[in-house]
Amino acid sequence: MRQKPRKIARYVPLAALAGLLALAGGRRASAQTATLQHGSGAAASSNQYVGNATCAMCHQELASQMAGNPHHKIAMLEGHAGHTCESCHGPGRAHVDGGGDITKIRHFDVLTPSQIDATCLSCHAQTHPNFMRSPHGRAGVSCLSCHSIHKAEPETTLLVATQPLLCYRCHSDIKPSFSMPFHHRVNEGLMQCTDCHDVHGTFQANNLRNTVDQNMVCVKCHIDVRGPFVYEHAPVKAEGCMGCHTPHGSVNARLLNMPNINVLCNQCHSQVAADTVHGMNSGSSDSIPCTTCHTYIHGSNMDEAFLR
Ligand code: HEC
Ligand code: HEC
Ligand code: HEC
Ligand code: HEC
Ligand code: HEC
Ligand code: HEC
Ligand code: HEC
Ligand code: HEC
Ligand code: HEC
Ligand code: HEC
């Protein structure tokens, strides 16, 4: 970045201002007028800045589209002195004096991913503090790989494409699992990749969303298996759901990570089949699924063998 971004207020005041905007009727047109006036009014505080009204003279279309962009709220920062365009593009006086000299304005095409991220994070670090050490941040997948300020898809959070297409652009290897006979219905639009992942980085492996109880991105929706139970099945808490399930899709109707329940159980309970109460020898163990009897496989409040 050539210019150090101006210090701006963080989300607490922002939220308050958003409230004020709503109180004022939330009328975008009037908010935009305020933007332009305050933007040009503030130009006096730093003669590097020209204010939005000046940008709008030559970039009319982009400037008028800004009214429908969440970033019109930048104008409300710094006690209504925020510079909407110049908060991202840097001070514009040299560009304007040069009659639109494109070498004198911050131009995202020529920035490196980390320069782009730093520009966006100058305001968004509070909500996405882990981005730079996330798999995306480290791999140079910048904010603009997924977001666009001026050319976003309608009805998205300023995304360049809707989910899951956005994700499949780079993660085509994941796509086949969502076409398997049994799968979480992401392609059908019933849920999204980001119900389970936070692509901006988390404290979990695989960008899994942080939740209050660790491992438990799944029990947000599958509440009945969460417990706590009087009799816990140890691996549910110890290994987590992935000890037995696969998250995206499977040939198994219960999304098990093994094609057969008994093979799954016998990974850890191989002794059970022979010479026990079951009377199942290892040859017959496949014939009746273990869960025919051990119905409450995630834990039970009634029976220590999860029979009921
Ligand atoms: C006097 C007219 C004028 C004003 C005022 C002006 N620009 Fe420009 N700007 C131009 C012209 C001309 C270009 C080159 C356009 C092109 O090549 O398509 C340009 C290009 C740009 C580009 C690069 C576009 C690209 O090709 O990638 C950016 C970013 C930009 N302006 C931002 C701003 C901002 C922000 C402001 C207000 C601070 C501003 N401009 C004010 C005339 C102006
Ligand atoms: C939140 C940051 C941000 C704000 C605010 C912003 N821009 Fe941009 N601008 C970008 C980014 C990022 C790009 C690269 C293309 C994209 O993502 O849409 C860009 C691209 C441009 C371009 C190049 C043409 C194009 O469409 O690629 C021009 C010109 C421009 N902006 C002018 C403006 C003007 C004028 C304003 C104020 C009305 C403004 N920008 C406000 C971030 C911003
Ligand atoms: C000068 C501060 C500032 C900068 C720089 C900035 N933003 Fe924002 N951004 C905001 C504000 C303010 C909002 C509106 C927040 C709200 O509504 O609570 C916002 C909202 C957003 C949203 C949410 C949109 C929605 O629909 O909820 C996205 C996505 C976003 N910004 C991405 C970016 C990206 C990508 C960049 C870098 C190109 C960037 N921002 C640069 C201040 C900024
Ligand atoms: C790999 C794609 C991807 C990258 C890279 C990415 N985002 Fe996002 N972003 C998304 C998606 C998808 C959503 C909507 C779902 C969600 O909230 O997780 C989103 C939502 C947001 C939101 C609004 C919701 C919220 O959580 O606040 C903001 C603001 C935002 N992104 C800013 C950024 C910034 C800033 C960067 C770069 C530092 C960035 N994003 C990088 C995909 C991405
Ligand atoms: C522009 C390309 C790109 C887009 C778009 C993209 N990703 Fe990624 N993603 C990557 C790269 C590169 C990595 C890091 C290298 C790797 O692990 O594959 C990564 C890593 C990940 C990881 C972590 C993998 C791990 O091994 O820890 C997850 C999860 C992920 N992406 C999910 C998503 C989701 C969900 C979306 C859509 C909202 C998305 N990505 C969009 C390129 C992308
Ligand atoms: C139901 C929750 C859930 C949904 C929905 C989901 N994921 Fe995942 N994803 C996970 C879990 C859990 C893991 C970790 C798997 C493991 O530990 O073996 C994972 C792993 C990954 C990985 C890294 C490991 C690998 O298999 O390469 C990528 C990349 C990924 N997911 C991308 C996506 C994309 C893209 C989407 C949407 C099309 C998506 N995920 C939807 C839960 C989910
Ligand atoms: C956003 C909500 C949500 C999250 C998060 C979620 N699921 Fe699901 N899950 C569903 C829904 C809805 C279904 C029903 C499938 C369908 O018919 O579309 C389902 C189905 C299942 C099934 C098959 C159930 C059956 O009745 O046959 C299993 C197993 C499962 N999920 C495990 C998991 C695991 C493991 C995780 C964490 C990696 C997880 N789920 C995360 C919503 C969710
Ligand atoms: C020890 C292995 C194991 C672990 C760990 C495990 N499950 Fe299961 N789960 C199963 C088996 C086996 C079935 C199939 C039961 C059947 O067919 O009757 C199942 C079935 C399910 C179902 C389908 C509906 C139901 O209750 O039968 C859901 C949803 C589910 N599991 C979610 C989860 C979640 C969420 C986690 C993590 C909190 C988890 N499972 C951990 C073995 C496990
Ligand atoms: C990842 C290893 C693992 C898998 C897979 C697994 N279990 Fe377990 N299971 C355990 C552990 C560890 C215990 C606790 C043993 C103890 O306390 O002695 C346990 C306990 C049990 C108990 C109660 C035992 C007792 O002593 O009261 C039953 C019944 C049981 N498992 C059945 C199953 C069935 C049926 C499956 C297949 C659906 C299965 N388990 C899959 C590890 C596993
Ligand atoms: C026909 C019903 C039935 C089937 C099928 C069944 N079990 Fe059991 N299992 C029981 C009963 C009954 C008990 C004894 C409970 C008690 O003592 O309270 C038991 C006890 C257990 C125990 C705890 C006692 C021990 O011997 O360690 C484990 C572990 C276990 N079963 C695992 C399995 C596994 C793994 C399978 C599949 C290979 C399986 N069971 C299939 C009915 C069954």
Image (cartoon, helix red, strand yellow):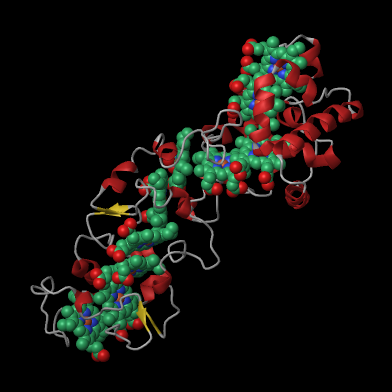
Q: Position of residue 175 (x, y in %)?
A: 33, 42
How many numbered marks have been drawn onto this rendered protein structure? 0
Looking at the rendered image, the quarter that the N terminus falls into is top right
Does residue 103 appear anywhere in the picture? no
Which residue is rendered at x = 77% and y = 46% of the image?
A: 24
Residue lying furthest left: 283
Which residue is rendered at x = 77% and y = 52% of the image?
A: 16
Left or right position of 98 against 60? right
Q: Where is residue 232 in the image (x, y as percent from the top left)?
A: 39, 80
Compared with residue 307, is residue 213 higher up or lower down, i.e. above or below?
A: above
Which residue is rendered at x = 57% and y = 31% of the image?
A: 148
Left or right position of 137 against 45? left
Compared with residue 267, is residue 158 higher up or lower down, i.e. above or below?
A: above
Looking at the rendered image, the quarter that the C terminus falls into is bottom left
Q: Position of residue 84 (x, y in %)?
A: 74, 31
Say which of 164 and 238 sits in front: 164
Left or right position of 304 against 279? right
Does residue 288 appear anywhere in the picture? yes
Quadrant position of residue 33: top right
Say which of 150 and 146 sits in front: 150
Q: Position of residue 229 (x, y in %)?
A: 42, 82
Which residue is rendered at x = 57% and y = 37% of the image?
A: 158
Say which of 187 and 118 sits in front: 187
Say which of 305 and 186 sits in front: 186
- Splitting the image into four quadrants, where does ligand 3 fall? top right
Residue lying furthest right: 44
Left or right position of 227 against 244? right
Quadrant position of residue 275: bottom left
